[in-house]
Image (spheres, helix red, strand yellow):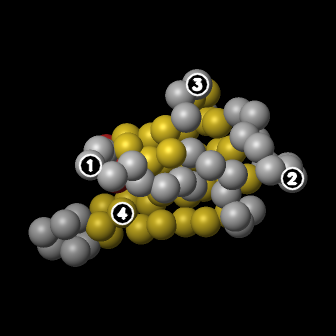
Amino acid sequence: MGAPINGTDTYVIGVPRFKAARFAVLDPESGENTGWFSTFRDGEGDHVARVELNGVEITRPYLHHSEIVAGGELRVT
C-alpha cells in the first residue's frame, strides 16, 4: 500500500509488494473488527499507472487514514 507521512494522517500510495492483501479494521477502543480494507495489484511493473478506491479513480498520490479505516478496496494498476 504505502508508507505513512510522519506528522500527518496520510499514506503515500506505492506499488504493492503482494498481488492481494486484506487488513482487518479494528475499533481502537473495543478492539473489535469493524470492517476490511483490501488492496489488489493488477499487472506487473514497478510504477503506478492508476489507483481506484472502491471503484473510483484517485488522482492524488496518497490516502487519508480515515479512508483506510472506513474499509473498502484499493486497486493499483
Name the front one of labels 4 and 3.
Answer: 3
Residue occupying the far right of the picture: 44
Inspect this view and state whether residue 37 appears. Answer: yes
In the image shown, does 56 or 17 lie closer to the viewer?
A: 17
Asked whether disc 1 touches disc 3, contact meaning CB atoms under 8 Å apart, the reply is: no
Crowding at mark 2 (Cα within 10 Å: few <14, some 14-19, many 20+): few
First of labels 2, 1 by sequence position: 1
Mark 1 element type: loop
Mark 4 to mark 2: distance in Å?
28 Å
Using the image as rendered, state which of residue 25 and residue 11 is in the foreground: 11
Q: Residue at x 86, y 52 (%)?
A: 44
Separation of marks 1 and 3 at Cα, in angstroms: 22 Å
Q: Residue 13 sits in which quadrant?
A: top right
Q: Amino acid at mark 3?
A: Thr
State the mark number for residue 7: 1
Q: Which residue in the structure is indicated by mark 2?
A: 44
Q: Which mark is residue 25?
A: 4
User: Going from the N terminus, do you reach mark 1 or mark 4 first?
Assistant: 1
Residue positioned 65% across, 45% down in the render: 75
For the N terminus, the image quarter is bottom right
Q: Nearer the viewer, mark 2 or mark 1?
A: 1
Q: Which mark is residue 45?
A: none
Q: Amino acid at mark 1?
A: Gly
For the residues carrying marks 1 and 3, which lies nearer the camera in this image? 1
What kind of element bears circle 3? loop
The residue under label 2 is which amino acid type?
Answer: Glu
Q: CA distance from mark 4 to mark 3?
A: 24 Å
Please indicate whether residue 1 sits to the left or right of residue 49 in the image: left
Q: Quadrant of residue 53?
A: top right
Say which quarter of the image contains residue 40.
bottom right
Q: Which residue is mark 3?
A: 59
Question: Comparing marks 4 and 2, which lies closer to the viewer?
Answer: 2
